[in-house]
Amino acid sequence: MYSIVDFYQTIHHKFPDISKKADLLFMNDWGQFLPEYAYSWFEKLAYALNSEMKNGVSFLVHKPLFDFLNDILQNANDEIKACIDVAFTENLFWQLPEDKSSLYWIHLPESIKCLYLAFHGRPPI
């Protein structure tokens, strides 16, 4: 794959609804998006998904995004893999109760589960 900024733009194009939610979280903390803050935006994408989980939004709504991330991980360059790992996956499920986390965890692609487990050492449930 390409650069982090290209990846950011692709996510916006393919997944506009959750991207808008991540944009709002990003703007509250950082202001207008600048390319050098792309990693931070992917952290906010994880937080936006955490909010969706907390509010009971079905995994099926975001399954295409997780499938896309899984596909990207298969062929991505090191920069994109690190972004998904460090900025996104490490912040996924942050401070969520088990009953909310479990509804997503059981359906996550294995590649994302592996990244999560490598960092946290245990599942969020």
Image: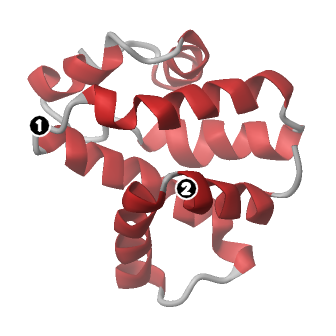
Question: Mark 2 is on which residue type?
Answer: Phe
Vertical position of residue 20 compared to residue 121: above or below: below
Residue at image mark 2: 42
Q: Quadrant of residue 20?
A: bottom left
Residue at image mark 1: 56
Q: Residue at x 33, y 54 (%)?
A: 48
Q: Sequence order check: which comes first, mark 1 or mark 2?
A: 2
In x, y percent, where is residue 106? 32, 10
In this view, the residue in front, 108 or 13, is 13
Question: Mark 1 is on which residue type?
Answer: Gly
- Residue lying furthest bottom: 32
Q: Quadrant of residue 67?
A: top right
In this view, the residue in front, 113 or 17, is 17
Q: Residue at x 40, y 80 (%)?
A: 29
Q: Quadrant of the N terminus?
A: top right
Q: Quadrant of the C terminus?
A: top left
Q: Secondary structure at mark 2?
A: helix
Vertical position of residue 73 compared to residue 2: above or below: above
Q: Quadrant of residue 41?
A: bottom right
Between marks 1 and 2 in the image, the one whose residue lies nearer the viewer: 1
